[in-house]
Image: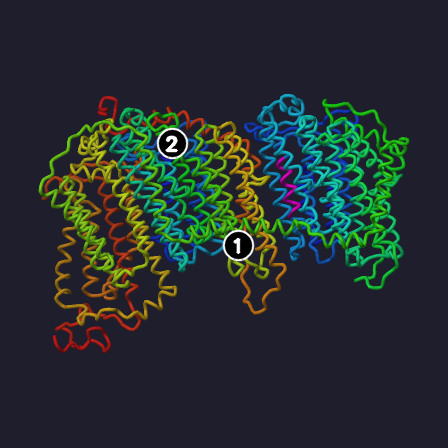
């Protein structure tokens, strides 16, 4: 029995209380443990991803109870990839938090950070819907803690809205779980896949409502319009490294949609046919458009980036909503890209904030570190706006390609391309305002000098740029793997049988009482 | 040299200038030159293959699934453009060394320039159209950086953004066009696409693909109506204008039309769109150019005009037109780059580019005069310079082109274009170089150093050489033309020569030159008329459109994203309800499978209480204290409900949770106003009410539906009921589910609880560091404080109760596995025991006696729970696997020991820590500077002889 699959959950879950217990007054010790922990996470995640890359499914029965009675963790290509992405992102975010000193501006940053990682990792790995709810709670409460890290009125206000809106989501999640349990009597995803198929065609209303409620829960997490209102302020006001980490949080929602709506409610399932086809794609297109219009409308750099996150999630959701193997592969590639690009932009915005009085898109006198910071911003903007040569462009091509010959091709192409144009306009305006226009303004001699970002602060966004470049150069390989993932998702039998047919405690072949 | 190297060299070389920046300007430009030279020589090594008519290719797979591969090819057409790009690039680098001043960051400049060069070479060598798109957009981006290079100039910033927006828009359209094209053919490789002319032109999507691709070409090559960005790009340093915006980048659109010529051209749509766009651009650009007083603006519009000329030639769709186009591309690149460099020299030396302030430079700058005049004459179409040759060919071609069924339209417009073209060339020569030497130049001009005049001089030598000896260039032009035409046409037999005899083109040419001279003779009145005439100003319109877009965006976004939680929650909830209703209404419902149970009096009473409390809350919620009481009733009824449904565990938990939360909320209420102010309008309350009622009804309906129906298969809880004792060693199924079956969930939930406590703590810390601190310190309580804050009776009572409560907690903890109870409830009970001490004796007295910090207790709790889980690894079992055994320690009965108990201990600790930490955090808010806390457990202690210090609360209570 190998326990590695649970390590991404248990490791941060142990590290965090340890930090609280033994090192809560020692920032340096916290940093050391946090970084070492994340490095270990990367190693574990990489080996897990490697292990399942040939199509294996790893099953882990918690408390030794067989599914569906106990909780299981399931590692397949998709979940391990997301775990790896999270771990890698976490490393850069952590380095930035340390380099910029953000982690010392409030209490318990590292403990909350580890708890947050635990929640995200658990959400990706679990094979049980209720357990997913628990991890949603963990990541919600930890993210709230991280969000208001450092305090300040605006941040606290945005934090309250963030947590309240997501509590609506949690409540809805419970409604959905209750409905699903009342309809099927189980919460294990693989088991659900089988039982949903047994629902009689004359009695579909209940399961349809349950399926839609669940989708809406995930849509809140994925910030799909009109459930996105929590995102812009929350991400803009959150401390930069936290906002950067949050780039993966919206992907948790997208991941859950992909997982649930290929495994439990696959597109060809009859009882839930014609359910979200009607509104998911339009909502995704509106998200994409609204996000990019928000980029143009934003008056502050951090808000601009937050809106670009909404837009890029719209793009991801456009690809997902087509629910073909090709489009899911496209969405996965774009998801990796958008995580890295979004995180990187938030870090760059913080580099600006370090040396500039504020992030308002109005002329300010020249500030320190402009050359490197502006170069990073330029790269990030290119990536986010989906301009060549970076992965954003390739991802966009993949989405457009996947939409070819679908009924909605005209809509998708028009919105995708026009929103790109709007975002180019928005990013160009912002960049020129922040980085160029300051050259025309003489510095105020009375202003007190602003600090310069530390060298370590540049390592994190620089590293993310390197990853984006790697994602571009190895686009063929990554996309190939995304296609493998999609293939595995659309042929879920091995997943289901691995989960349901592995015996656990008291469920030997003779004692099978289900 | 491999094509990869030719493309990659400028990109990797772009790192060098930045690195060498501090080594001096010559070093910086030197490395740039070497990089370009290497690429140039690399290109030349492929010349023999190209001359032999071969196509050199190189390929690496990139995204084969998408059809995007790194496929390069070099044929005559690609070679021709690459030669222009790299050759002129070398001259520009030399020129820029002399042009840029010490204040300019040369490393940055050459970095961008090399990036551009690489992208441009990439365009012309791409075999894959998606790859071409990538390079295409890269040129837009590098051009953006180069136009905005002088960051302090507003024109630079605005011009850069305008160029990026317009060309970016075209690029996006082209993405769509290229994807359609690729889907039609089934491949994105040009070598395949170019073989499928009939397939493409027969496809119903041909027109859309054509329009989208042309949109890309027209924006890039500044064709009407997208020509307006090019003059504004002139804010860039002159080397950039000469290189990007006359010789190379703006020819990318032309290149693409030439590249796609074999498959896209020849249809009526192509001829009509391309020819007319070209013609309009040619005439319009030429007319505007005459009246521009800025030397670079004049040249910019003349570039627009000439690009229109080339576009028109490609649009006619004949082989001769294509050949003329190729030849004119070559000629235009030579004379226009030379002219731009001359303009740069003049600007550099005289510190102005305004033609009205110049004149007489012939004597002051003889070298520049010769260069610029030769180039301008060539542009005007004066023999024996190369411009004359291609203009003749253009006029010849125009003579054979019919548009909209009107024979004379194209030739006439061509003559008009040529006429104005000649006119602005003459204006350039006469008004800048001739006339008297003035004494009011901003700076006394003289000829520049060699670095600046040599590059244009080399180009002018080419101008003269090609013009005088066209037979030298002819084979090359025909080679390029043949590769342009591909299989779609034959290279025409016509020779390029100065004298064709008395053909109509000659008369047209003469008419144009004479007309040009007349225009320039009448320049002053014409100019006045032009200035007086109203005309659309592109920049104003563009700025208005962008500002309108930004304004619209703000009006769309800002009001709805102003942070109003109630609105966003209402929208979100409404969306959820609608989506749910849609799902319901599209589904099917059968008759219920379960019958309604009769409702007993207890159930009805409980229900009535719940409803009453909820409805009352609606009316009294502004009184916060009352609201709290009503919430308490609701919580209590829920606990009773659990009892009713035979879940004593849940009831106990709910009950203790209620107690603790009410205490915490009471503490929090202490800092809040006693009443909630009215903040929303009636309309908004009605809206929220409607949404809330709809949501409630929907929830009710859904619950009702499910309550009357069975699950599709036996629920998993039946397994839990059956195996709780057998597998989990406990008869209390709820507890076994919590610590064993679904212990992992519990593990997560105690973490949630712990985080919540840490969060409350961090939040209070943040509050106390912020401006709220002052408000808290200066707060005057709205109610009088109790005179006796720590009454003796209460202190004594709580001390006595404490061990009893702890005992109860211990008991509840231990019995948990088999009877209602467990770590969670025990934790809450123990917390209550400690809370009582706080309440009785105050914060500081109690915390002074605290030995275990609550942070640590939370941490320890989670660690213990986690360690219990990890423990099972040592026996080769999964995380949290439980085991149990029965032991007997005399004199006790036999009792059960389960590993789950350690897990429960972790739960217990986490709960205690979390509750106490939250409480402690609230109490910290309550402490105020001017009210020192008592050191004593109670205010009045008969056994204490010294009186409490003055000022202490409750001091001097003589009455007691």
Counting from the top left corner in percent of width and height, residue B670 is at 25, 63
Is B607 above or below relative to B44? below
Counting from the top left corner in percent of width and height, residue B661 is at 23, 54
Give the residues in magenta. Answer: B133-144
Which secondary structure type mostly characterizes the magenta part of the structure? helix
Does A243 appear in magenta? Answer: no
- Identify the residue position indicated by label 1 in the image: A351
Q: Quadrant of residue B337?
A: top right
Q: Quadrant of residue B596?
A: top left
Q: Is residue B30 visible?
A: no
Image quarter in which the N terminus of chain A is found: top left
Q: Which residue is found at the position 59% from the left and 49% from the top?
A: A375
Q: Which mark is residue A261?
A: 2
Element assignment for label 2: helix
On whether disc 1 and disc 2 are found on a single subunit, the reply is yes
The span from disc 1 to disc 2 (Cα, nearest Å) is 39 Å
Q: Quadrant of residue B82?
A: top right
Counting from the top left corner in percent of width and height, residue A258 is at 41, 33
Name the one closer to the observer, B393 or B213.
B393
């Amino acid at each position: 029995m190998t326990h590695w699959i649970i390590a991404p959950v248990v490791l941060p879950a142990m590290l965090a209380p340890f930090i609280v217990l033994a090192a809560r007054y020692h920032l340096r010790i916290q940093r050391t443990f946090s970084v070492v922990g994340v490095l270990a996470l990367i190693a574990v995640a990489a080996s897990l991803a490697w292990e399942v890359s040939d199509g294996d499914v790893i099953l882990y029965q918690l408390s030794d109870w067989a599914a569906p009675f106990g909780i299981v963790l399931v590692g397949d290509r998709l979940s391990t990839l997301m775990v790896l992405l999270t771990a890698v992102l976490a490393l850069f975010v952590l380095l930035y938090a340390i380099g910029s000193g953000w982690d010392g501006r409030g209490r318990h940053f590292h403990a909350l950070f580890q708890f947050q990682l635990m929640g995200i990792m658990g959400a990706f790995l679990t094979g049980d819907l209720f357990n997913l709810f628990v991890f949603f709670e963990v990541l919600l409460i930890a993210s709230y803690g991280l969000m208001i890290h450092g305090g300040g009125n605006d941040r606290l206000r945005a934090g309250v809205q963030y947590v309240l809106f997501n509590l609506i989501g949690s409540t809805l999640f419970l409604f959905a779980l209750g409905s699903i349990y009342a309809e099927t009597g189980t919460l294990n995803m693989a088991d659900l896949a089988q039982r949903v198929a047994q629902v009689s065609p004359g009695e579909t209303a209940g399961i349809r409502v349950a399926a839609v409620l669940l989708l809406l829960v995930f849509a809140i997490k994925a910030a799909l319009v009109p459930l996105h209102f929590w995102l812009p302020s929350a991400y803009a006001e959150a401390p930069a490294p936290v906002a950067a980490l949050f780039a993966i949080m919206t992907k948790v929602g997208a991941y859950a949609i992909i997982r649930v709506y290929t495994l439990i409610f696959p597109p060809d399932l009859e009882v839930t046919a014609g359910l979200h086809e009607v509104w998911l794609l339009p909502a995704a297109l509106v998200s994409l458009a609204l996000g990019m219009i928000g980029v143009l409308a934003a008056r502050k750099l951090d808000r601009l980036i937050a809106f670009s996150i909404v837009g890029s999630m719209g793009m991801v959701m456009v690809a997902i909503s087509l629910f073909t193997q090709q489009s899911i592969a496209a969405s996965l590639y774009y998801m990796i890209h958008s995580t890295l690009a979004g995180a990187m932009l938030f870090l760059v915005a913080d580099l600006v904030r370090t040396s500039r009085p504020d992030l308002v898109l109005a002329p300010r006198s020249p500030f320190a570190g402009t050359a490197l910071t502006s170069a990073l911003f330029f790269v990030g903007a290119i990536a986010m706006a989906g301009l060549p040569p970076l992965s954003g462009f390739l991802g966009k091509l993949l989405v457009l390609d996947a939409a070819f010959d679908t009924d909605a091709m005209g809509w998708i192409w028009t919105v995708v391309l026009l929103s790109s144009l709007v975002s180019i306009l928005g990013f160009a305006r912002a960049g020129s305002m922040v980085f160029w226009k300051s050259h025309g303004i003489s510095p105020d001699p009375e202003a007190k000098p602003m600090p310069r970002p530390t060298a370590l602060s540049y390592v994190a966004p620089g590293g993310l740029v390197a990853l984006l470049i790697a994602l571009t150069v190895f686009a063929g390989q990554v996309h190939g793997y995304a296609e493998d993932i999609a293939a595995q998702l659309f042929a879920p039998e091995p997943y289901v049988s691995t989960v349901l047919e592995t015996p656990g405690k008291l469920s030997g072949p003779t004692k099978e009482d289900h | 040299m491999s094509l990869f190297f030719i493309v990659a060299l400028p990109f990797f070389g772009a790192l060098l200038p930045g690195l060498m920046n501090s080594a001096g300007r010559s070093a910086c430009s030197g490395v740039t030159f070497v990089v370009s030279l290497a690429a140039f020589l690399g290109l030349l090594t492929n010349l023999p293959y190209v001359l032999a008519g071969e196509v050199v290719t190189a390929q690496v797979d990139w995204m084969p699934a998408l059809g995007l591969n790194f496929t390069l090819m070099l044929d005559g057409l690609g070679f021709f453009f690459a030669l222009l790009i790299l050759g002129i690039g070398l001259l520009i680098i030399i020129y820029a060394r002399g042009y840029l001043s010490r204040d300019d960051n040369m490393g940055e400049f050459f970095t961008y320039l090399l990036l551009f060069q690489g992208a441009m070479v990439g365009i012309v060598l791409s075999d894959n159209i998606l790859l071409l798109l990538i390079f295409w957009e890269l040129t837009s981006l590098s051009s953006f950086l180069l136009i905005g290079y002088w960051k302090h100039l507003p024109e630079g910033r605005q011009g850069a953004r305008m160029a990026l927006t317009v060309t970016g828009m075209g690029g996006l359209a082209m993405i769509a066009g290229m994807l359609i094209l690729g889907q039609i053919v089934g491949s994105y490789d040009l070598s395949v696409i170019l073989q499928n002319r009939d397939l493409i032109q027969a496809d119903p999507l041909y027109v859309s693909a054509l329009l989208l691709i042309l949109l890309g070409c027209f924006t890039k090559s500044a064709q009407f109506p997208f020509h307006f960005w090019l003059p504004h790009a002139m804010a860039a340093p002159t080397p950039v204008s000469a290189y990007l915006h006359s010789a190379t980048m703006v020819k990318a659109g032309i290149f693409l039309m030439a590249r796609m010529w074999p498959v896209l051209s020849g249809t009526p749509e192509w001829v009509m769109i391309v020819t007319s766009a070209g013609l309009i651009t040619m005439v319009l650009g030429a007319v505007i150019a005459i009246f521009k007083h800025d030397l670079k603006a004049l040249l910019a519009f003349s570039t627009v005009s000439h690009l229109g000329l080339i576009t028109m030639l490609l649009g006619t769709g004949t082989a001769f037109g294509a050949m003329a186009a190729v030849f004119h591309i070559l000629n235009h690149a030579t004379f226009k780059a030379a002219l731009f460099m001359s303009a740069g020299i003049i600007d550099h030396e005289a510190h102005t580019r305004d033609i009205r302030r110049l004149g007489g430079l012939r004597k002051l700058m003889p070298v520049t005069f010769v260069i610029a005049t030769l180039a301008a004459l060539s542009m005007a179409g004066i023999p024996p310079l190369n411009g004359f040759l291609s203009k003749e060919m253009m006029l010849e071609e125009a003579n054979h082109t019919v548009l909209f069924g009107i024979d004379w339209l194209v030739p006439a417009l061509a003559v008009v274009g040529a006429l104005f073209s000649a006119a602005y060339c003459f204006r350039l020569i006469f008004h800048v170089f001739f006339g008297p030497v003035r004494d009011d130049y901003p700076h006394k001009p003289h000829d520049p150093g060699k670095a600046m005049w040599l590059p244009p001089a080399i180009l002018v030598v080419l101008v003269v050489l090609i013009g005088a000896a066209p037979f030298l260039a002819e084979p090359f032009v025909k080679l390029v033309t043949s590769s342009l035409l591909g299989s779609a046409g034959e290279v025409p037999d016509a020779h390029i020569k100065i004298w064709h005899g008395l053909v109509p083109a000659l008369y047209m040419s003469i008419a144009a030159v004479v007309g040009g001279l007349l225009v320039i003779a009448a320049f002053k009145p014409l100019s006045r008329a032009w200035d007086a005439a109203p005309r659309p100003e592109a920049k104003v319109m563009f700025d208005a459109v962008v500002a309108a877009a930004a304004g619209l965006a703000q009006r769309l976004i800002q009001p709805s994203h102003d942070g109003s939680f109630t609105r966003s929650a209402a929208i979100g909830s409404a969306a959820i309800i609608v989506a749910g209703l849609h799902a319901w209404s599209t589904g099917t419902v059968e008759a219920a499978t379960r019958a309604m149970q009769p409702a007993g009096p207890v159930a009805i009473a409980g229900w009535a209480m719940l409803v009453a409390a909820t409805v009352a809350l609606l009316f009294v919620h502004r009184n916060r204290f009352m609201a709290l009481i009503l919430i308490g009733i609701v919580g209590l009824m829920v606990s009773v409900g659990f009892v009713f449904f035979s879940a004593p565990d849940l009831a106990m938990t709910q009950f203790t949770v209620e107690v603790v939360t009410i205490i915490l909320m009471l503490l929090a209420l202490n800092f809040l106003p006693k009443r909630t102010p009215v903040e929303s309008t009636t309309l908004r309350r009605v809206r929220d009410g409607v949404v809330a009622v709809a949501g409630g009804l929907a929830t009710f309906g859904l619950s009702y539906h499910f309550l009357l129906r069975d699950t599709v298969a036996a629920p998993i809880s039946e397994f839990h009921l059956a195996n709780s004792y057998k597998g989990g060693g406990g008869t209390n199924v709820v507890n076994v589910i919590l610590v064993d079956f679904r212990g992992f969930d519990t593990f997560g939930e105690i973490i949630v609880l712990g985080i919540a406590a840490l969060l409350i703590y961090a939040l209070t810390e943040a509050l106390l560091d912020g401006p709220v601190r002052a408000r808290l310190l200066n707060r005057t309580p709205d109610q009088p404080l109790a005179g006796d804050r720590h009454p003796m009776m209460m202190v004594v009572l709580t001390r006595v109760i404490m061990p009893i409560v702890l005992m109860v907690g211990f008991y509840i903890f231990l019995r948990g596995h088999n009877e209602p109870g467990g770590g969670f409830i025990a934790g809450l009970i123990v917390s209550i025991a400690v809370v009582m001490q706080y309440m009785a004796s105050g914060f500081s007295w109690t915390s002074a006696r605290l030995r275990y910090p609550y942070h640590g207790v939370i941490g320890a709790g989670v660690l213990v729970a986690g360690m219990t889980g990890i423990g099972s690894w040592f026996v080769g079992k999964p995380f949290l696997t439980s085991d149990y055994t029965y032991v007997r320690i005399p004199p006790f009965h036999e009792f059960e020991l389960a590993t789950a108990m350690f897990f429960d201990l972790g739960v217990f600790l986490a709960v205690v820590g979390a509750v106490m930490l939250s409480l402690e955090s609230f109490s910290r808010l309550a402490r105020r500077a001017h009210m020192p806390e008592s050191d004593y457990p109670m205010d009045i202690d008969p056994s204490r002889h010294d009186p409490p210090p003055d000022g202490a609360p409750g001091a001097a209570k003589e009455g007691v």
